[in-house]
């Protein structure tokens, strides 16, 4: 199987390459991409020898092309992402680019009929109906890599027999922190997740619980379920990754140690199973598995999810850049959604217009907070 890993230098990309390297006769790394981390991408290319490497956030650079020529052909710009995602020789695409930047390449992979290993939840958050329609038309197979959605996928039978699905959430590092102490939270504290090793943006999303709001929207499109059939439970141990309740009262759950190589291996090999490198779960050591209900849930439609995602990306980046306090993230998102009108998401252009409008609004709110 020829594999393109988009977002190869991030945590999901590295875990994907780790799993693939454990099965050298089964997987060949065909293409790797990064936004601008040229040195890190070059090291991966030296190890995995892909045919193509892509620096999507870098303009044509002769010196970089020369450096990469020892092991691969280097491409530049966002259009190159779509080129490798839809390449005729690519069988599977790991869509692991964080945020809206990964939208076009994920759509390209779906339209081209690839096995799409979906770690970029924003693609479904922003363009759920469009993405799933593209997958149907291209006869692509969309397999979720988020641990929660992959867990649901493993337990999900037919929609008619499912009563509801339950996504679990760790609660992040501030689950028990008093509200009055959150204003002084630093980026380092927010990124110190108690269970998972993740990138900075998704770590902050976990700390604010925005990650779970985005996952509810993602689950709605992946499993074609009404919002009222999707619930969230706080599960601090991150052992039970999701549950599926059936109409007969049965509940199936997927359990494993918190290691992203488990869902990655499942998506890579489905419908088979392969060794992932993750440590096997020993329930005798888990001792206590606890669950709590969160304080709130989110439901949105039309272009609202795109606006939500855009405002969150702007606010989180401002927090990571020390331009916005942790508690300001929620204020910026809430006000942006109030100011941006929700429209029907008829096509990609409408989604991108909503995304751009929300980013302008959120950026102005960040500036106002800093004034």
Image (tube, grey):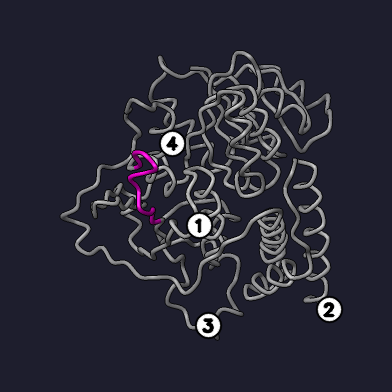
- Tell me which numbered mark, 3 or 4, is placed earlier along the sequence: 3
Task: Write down the residue under mark 3.
Answer: 179
- Residue at disc 1, secondary structure: helix
Whether residue 275 sits left or right of residue 215 in the image: it is: left
Q: Quadrant of residue 359?
A: bottom right
Task: Write down the residue under mark 1.
Answer: 227
- Tell me which numbered mark, 4 or 1, is placed earlier along the sequence: 1
Q: Quadrant of residue 326?
A: bottom right
Residue neighbourhood size for the residue with mark 2, other residues' Cα within 10 Å, grouped as few (<14), some (14–19), many (≥20): few
Task: Write down the residue under mark 4.
Answer: 264
Residue neighbourhood size for the residue with mark 1, other residues' Cα within 10 Å, grouped as few (<14), some (14–19), many (≥20): some
> Looking at the image, is 291 positioned above or below residue 31?
below
Foreground tag (2 vs 1): 1
- Tell me which numbered mark, 1 or 3, is placed earlier along the sequence: 3
Quadrant assignment for the C terminus: bottom right
* Residue nearest the observer in this picture, 119 or 286: 119
Rendered location of residue 273, percent (x, y): 32, 28
Residue 79 falls inside the magenta stretch = no
Q: Which residues are magenta?
A: 156-166
């Amino acid at each position: 199987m020829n594999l393109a890993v988009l977002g190869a230098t991030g945590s999901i990309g590295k875990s994907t390459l780790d799993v693939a390297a454990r099965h050298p006769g089964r997987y060949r790394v065909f293409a790797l991409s990064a936004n601008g981390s040229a040195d890190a991408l070059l090291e991966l290319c030296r190890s995995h020898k892909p045919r193509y490497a892509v620096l999507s956030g870098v303009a044509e650079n002769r010196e970089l092309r020369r450096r990469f020529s020892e092991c691969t052909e280097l491409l530049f710009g966002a259009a190159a992402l779509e080129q490798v995602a839809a390449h005729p020789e690519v069988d599977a695409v790991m869509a692991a680019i964080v945020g809206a930047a990964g939208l076009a390449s994920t759509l390209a992979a779906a339209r081209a009929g690839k096995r799409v290993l979906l770690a970029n939840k924003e693609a479904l958050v922003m363009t759920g109906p469009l993405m799933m329609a593209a997958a149907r038309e291209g006869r692509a197979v969309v397999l979720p890599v988020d641990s929660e959605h992959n867990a649901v996928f493993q337990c999900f039978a037919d929609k008619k027999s499912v009563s509801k699905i339950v996504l679990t959430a760790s609660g992040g590092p501030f689950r028990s922190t008093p509200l009055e102490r959150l204003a002084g939270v630093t980026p380092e504290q927010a990124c110190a997740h108690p269970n998972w090793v993740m990138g900075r943006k998704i770590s902050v999303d976990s700390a604010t619980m925005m990650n779970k709001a985005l996952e509810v929207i993602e689950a709605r499109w992946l499993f074609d379920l009404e919002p009222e059939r999707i619930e969230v439970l706080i599960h601090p141990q991150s052992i039970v990754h999701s549950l599926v309740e059936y109409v007969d009262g049965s509940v199936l759950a997927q359990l494993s140690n918190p290691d992203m190589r488990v869902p990655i291996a499942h998506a890579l090999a489905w419908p088979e199973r392969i060794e992932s490198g993750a440590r096997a779960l020993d329930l005798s050591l888990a001792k206590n598995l606890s669950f709590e209900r969160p304080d709130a849930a989110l439901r949105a439609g039309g272009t609202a999810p795109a606006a939500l995602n855009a405002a969150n990306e702007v606010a989180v980046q401002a927090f990571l850049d020390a331009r916005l306090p942790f508690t300001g993230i929620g204020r910026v998102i809430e006000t942006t959604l109030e100011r941006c009108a929700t429209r029907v998401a008829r096509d990609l252009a409408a989604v991108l217009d909503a995304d751009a409008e929300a980013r302008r609004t959120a950026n102005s709110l960040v500036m106002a907070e800093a004034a």
